[in-house]
Image (spheres, rainbow, N blue to C red):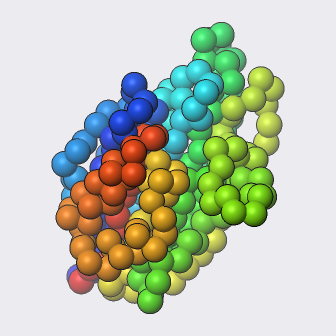
Amino acid sequence: MRYITVTALSHPGLLRDHNEDSLVAGPWTLCGTATENPQTLVFPLGTPLVVAVADGIGGQPAGEVASALTVRQLAALGPSLSSEQAVREALNLCNRAVYTAAGRDPDLMTMGTTVAGAVVLAESLLIFNVGDSRVLDVTGDGLRQVSVDDSPPLPPGRRTTSLVTQALGGATRFSAITPHVATAPLTAGDRYLICTDGLTDPVPEDELDDLLRTHENGRAAFELWKSAIEAGGPDNITLALLGIGE
């Protein structure tokens, strides 16, 4: 019987005074907290299982509220996410929920979040994102990004940017989104990394690839987190390692 493993970790980093990231794995959510010790969950393969990270937009109020609202909505909708269209509709619901919550409280005005993740189905994977949090395929010969960054073009010589071209919420007036959603085949042994830019901005992709080739599950999550901390830990760090076993 095939099964799903999810190893997750979330940490504020070294420079931020609190964690605005959130995470969902099936019915389990982790919001605005710190877990230096990776947690591994095991799920049966069958019912749609959503695994995602949400990164509250820095420099704007209540990013942790927007990210928590998003992952809790996805946790509730997770078992119904059986198609690309269902995922798009769920992300649009999350976007409206963030704007609705912001409209009720002036202290939440312009709060927003990115989101990236995957829904594991019996024979396939639905990959999705809005913003610059990422989904990376670890299965092949090299790390391969399968999400689509919503970021402006980078000038020559620059590897990262804090700007995003779309997010859930984040503006004074409602703005519709166009989620990125794609389907990939699923086989035993597949591995994916789902993470916020607190990992991918400070740590080059070749270093991430080396760590994921060398380690698995909890040790891999710990080493990824440590690499971001050793690079200065400039942002909140949240990641989920998704694996298919049998």
Residue at x 47%, y 48% (from the top left corner): 198
Residue at x 45%, y 59% (from the top left corner): 203
How far across and how far down the image is residue 17, in percent?
Answer: 40, 25
How far across and how far down the image is residue 218, in percent?
Answer: 21, 62
In the picture shown, does residue 223 fall above or below 184?
above
From the viewer's perspective, tell me whether residue 48 is left or right of residue 36: right
Q: Quadrant of the N terminus?
A: bottom left
Residue farthest toward the top in the current orientation of the protein: 106
Number of marks: 0
| Residue 230 visible, this orientation | yes
Q: Nearer the viewer, residue 134 or 101?
A: 134
How far across and how far down the image is residue 18, in percent?
Answer: 39, 27
Residue at x 54%, y 23% (from the top left corner): 62
Q: Quadrant of the C terminus?
A: bottom left
Residue at x 75%, y 63% (from the top left corner): 156
From the viewer's perspective, tell me whether residue 126 is left or right of residue 93: left
In the picture shown, does residue 31 fall above or below 134?
above
| Residue 180 visible, this orientation | no
Q: Quadrant of residue 59?
A: top right
Residue farthest toward the front in the current orientation of the protein: 157
In the picture shown, does residue 107 fall above or below 17?
above
